[in-house]
Every structure is written in C-alpha cells, then in structure tokens.
Amino acid sequence: MSEERLVTQITPKSEDFSRWYLDLIRRAELADYAPMKGMMVIRPYGYAIWENIQRLLDRRIKALGHVNAYFPLFIPESFLRKEMEHLKGFAPEVAWVTHGGDDELEERLAVRPTSEAIIGYMYSKWIQSWRDLPILINQWANVVRWEKVTRPFLRTTEFLWQEGHTAHETREEAQEETLRILEMYREFVESELAIPVVHGRKTDREKFAGAEATYAIEALMSDGKALQMGTSHNLGQHFARVFDIKFEDRNQKLQYVWQTSWGVSTRLIGALVMSHGDDNGLAFPPQVAPIQVIIVPISIGNWKETVLPVANQVKDALGRAGFRVHLDDRTEHTPGWKFAEWEMRGVPLRLEIGPRDVQKNQAIAVRRDSKEKISLDISGLDKKVEEMLTVVQKALFQKALDFQRENTREAGNYEEFKKIIEDRRGFIKAFWCGNEECEARIKEETMATIRVLPLEQPALKAERCVCCGKEAAALAYFARSY
RNA sequence: CGGGGAGUGGCGCAGCCUGGUUAGCGCGCCUGCCUUGGGAGCAGGAGGUCGUCGGUUCAAAUCCGAUCUCCCCGACCA
C-alpha cells in the first residue's frame, strides 16, 4: 500500500527516468522552478548538499596549495573579444548587460559564463617575475550561460561552481597541475559522492574553447547516460598571449605564463540524485547528506514522557559527536509516514526509538540503502553510527561501481557498437582512429560521443577503428550523454 | 532554435470539442475526536477566477490572437 501511494507522488524510475528525476527533486525539496526560463531556486535541503560539497572540496583545493579569491561578475565585451576562439565557444550563450539604470553603457558587459578573461587581465598586472609564480587561485562563484535546453541541476541558466585558475613558469608545470586537479576531482567524487568515474582527455572536438587540452571525469547515471562531472584544462599560453601575461624567467628572458583552469558545479547534485536514487526516492552518501541520521520516535501512549526525552538525549549525543542529526518529533505524522518520508529524502541512517527500546536501552537502526535493521545499545551509539555510516558510504559506491562495470562494454565493430547503444546504452570501450570525421559520424548515427580517452592507454598493435576500420590511434570511452 | 504536448486551490487531475447558475475530484492543509512499531480513521472546515495580456460575444476556464513557463523529441553545452 505504501508503494502505491508513493507512485502517485513520484513517477517510478523504470517507467520514466526523466519524470522520476524531476518529481524527486521537487518532492524532496532540493530545488524548485523560478518563474524565469531555465532558472531554479536551490532550496535549503538541496543547498545543504552544496555546502557539504564546498567544504569537502575546498579542503582539498587548499591542501594542494590554492587560495580563494573573488573576481567581478561582469566582463567587458572587449575582453571576451580578445580571445576569438574563446568568444566563439561562448558567444551564443552569453547574457549581456547594456544599461546601468536608464543610461546605455558605452561598452556592453558580459555576465561571466566563465572567468578566464577577467582573471587573465588581472594576472597580467600581478605577474612580473618568475618569483610571482605559480599563482594558484580558486573562486567559488555563480556563472550564467543562456542555454536553450535546461534541466534542474544538470543545466540551468545560472549555476554555482568553483573555478580554479593557475599560472605557471613552464608547460610541464601546467600539465602537472592539470592532471593533479583531475586526480583531485576523481578522488573527491569517488570517495565523498560515492560515484565511480572514468577519467581521461577530451577529444579536440569536445575540449573547452581556448584550451590546449581538456581532461574530464565522467560518470554513468543509472539510466545508462554519461554525465560530465568535472573538467580540468591545460590552457597552454593562449590566454597569456591574449592578455599579455608575461614574466621574466630564471634566465632573464621574457616569456608568457602557462595556465590551467578547472571546475565542478552544482551539476554534481543532479549526479547524486541520478546515481544513487531509486523508486523510494533519494539515497545520499553519508559524507554529503544534509542529514546523516534521522531519529523517529515511536509515538505510542505517553511517548512524550517516556520516549521523547531519550530521543532528545540521543540527538544531543550524536550532535556532540559531530553527526548531522535530526529528531522528527512532529505529532501530526505517524512513524510509518516518517519512515517513508525520510527514505524519500535520502537520509542514510534512521534510528527508531519506541517504548520497548527505551525499556531495553536500545534503538533500532535502519539503513536507507539496504533497509537492513539492527538493534543498537544506546550507550556508545556514536561509535556504531560512525561504523554504519562508513558501511553505507562504501555500499553506495560499490553498488554504483557494479552498475558501471556491468554497463561498460567493448565493441569490436560498428554493428556491435550500434546494437549496444540502442539496446543497453552505458559506456562503450572501443578503438578510434583519431579522425574527427569518424567521431562526427558516430555521433550523427548513434548520438554517442567520445567521453574520454583514458590516460592509461593499452599498447596498440593491430587494433582497428570501430567506425572506419583503419588503424586505431587510441582507446576511447563512448556514451550518450547529458 | 525547429517539431510535438501541457499550464485549472500546495500537488496530481476532470471540465474545454458542442461558451450559459455557487468551477469539480483525489491527496495535502486547518479544527476536534480517536489513533500511532511501515505513509491510520471519523466528523467539520479553509483555500482557486482557470499562466499572463488582448480580442470575439449579452455571456469565456471553454472560441481566436499574442506572450510567458514547463515537459518530450531533435540541433548546441558545467
């Protein structure tokens, strides 16, 4: 019966993945539509996830020597125009400010779609000597891209992200930084978000406008489509030349700096929904869950005198131990209703405390991911909770990893490739000749694109391109993507 | 941006084709009683002017036009 009721609220995942995703985001109060096209409000329950992501990622960014700063939201048009390749990449989706009050501006201002231009300009003022390098700056900001098709969290007109911008003395240093960040993202997403990824280089066709090389982490969502989770760009000296970012090197020669830029966005929240959610709702990894432990008192008889005080003690104890814990002591809902509600909201661990439990000085702990129930002694509960959250975190990752492995297939020829994409989706590992025409043809005919070229490439012998049959240049991961 | 579908109390929908009293239904919400170990029950009650603007008409949720927004399918992207 509870299953039937849920169905009326959230479309089952198997029936319509897209509606399931949208229903869930609104029912769980992660976000709501704003009245302007493509814009959303991130509600407190959703924003709490972003705060957790920020905290956990910011720690890693700083551990690698970066510092935070903040650059302006507006960028003069002439700055964007200096880098035509960059401008062409973003021009169709830039929002322009043309007036200040009633007065028309002499020069239009772009609402930043990304900050390379304004940061490049500032770096040119700040950098003179090799002693000024490297510059390792990160910014937490909002950016605007006037996208034609939008989806909550996955692609919105305005979104929140973190963008790192570094400048280095040598090409090698910049490349090292680019890969160091890629690894940081991989480790962060896998260990904190419990989402397994594949990582590697993007093809020229898919790389960032103005970059020499783009690297990315990509994950498989549970509908078999890939989602780009983060990118790290080696910008070479493109922007340095345009913005005249020069320094006198150790040999007293004037040269341009070598730059990188990299970012992850609120899209990660959408990835959490699509990776771990099921027909009962969300399932958050404990590391980023807004609430890690929900306490539901079993309200029977004089529970307010007997059960509630114990529940409060447990809440306080877990709170002191550092857990994000919430006690649902509302009187207008039954325990059963609360069970279903908090499962839908993805809380990883539930503690049920009723009169019987109080008698025995115990609580019932229930995992969101497996529904497994066990009794725990209330004394020393924090240790047990810690253990269970660790187990849930690992189990979610393992489940997602199993899914990724089951849905990563090899295609030896184009017929196989097409069949897999049609029937199963998922990742396809296949060889590619390196020719952009094959890449384009595959996209045209199957809607699949090269997500990444893995960094660790097998030694090539007589392998053939899955599309044209000519000599292969690289192994690639293909998928249909968001 | 092209093709298709849709906007009616908080949510999900019916009504529209064939204009005509107080715009219905389920869930939710409020009050009371009674319940509470997997989304309880009964009784009473509040809440909408039909996305927005304009037109046709004696009369518009219903017909016509424009516009905004959402969803799906394609072309473009964190």
Image (cartoon, rainbow, N blue to C red):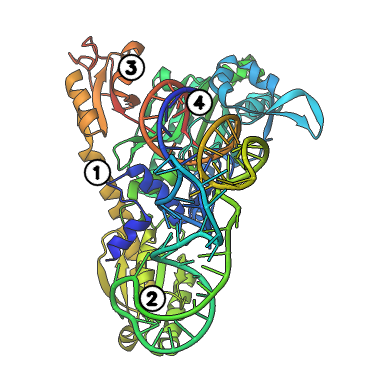
Residue type beneath disc 2: Thr
Reading the chain from its start, which is encountered first: label 4 or label 1? 4
Residue depicted at x 47% and y 75%: A330
Q: Earlier in the sequence, mark 4 or mark 2?
A: 4
**Local crowd size for mark 4, using a 10 Å CA cut-off: few (<14), some (14–19), many (≥20):** many
Residue A241: name its quadrant. Answer: top right
Work out whether residue A26 can be spotted.
Answer: yes
Q: Tag 3, which secondary structure? A: helix
Three-letter code, disc 4: Ala
Residue ID for mark 4: A174
Question: Would you name the residue on which mark 1 appears?
Answer: A403
- Mark 2 lies on a secondary structure that is loop
Measured in 3D between alpha carbons, the distance from the residue under mark 3 to the one under mark 2, in whole angstroms, is: 56 Å
Chain letter of the residue carrying label 2: A
Chain where mark 1 sits: A
Residue A108, x across and y down, in percent: 72, 24
Element marked by disc 4: helix
Residue drawn at (34%, 35%) of the image: A226
Residue A79 locus on image (x, y percent): 68, 21
The mark lying in front, picked from 4 and 1, is 1
Q: CA distance from mark 1 to mark 2?
A: 35 Å
- Indicate which label's residue lies in the foreground, 3 or 4: 3
For label 1, the crowd category at 10 Å Cα-Cα, with few meaning under 14, some 14 to 19 and many 20 or more, is some
Which residue lies under the disc numbered 3? A439
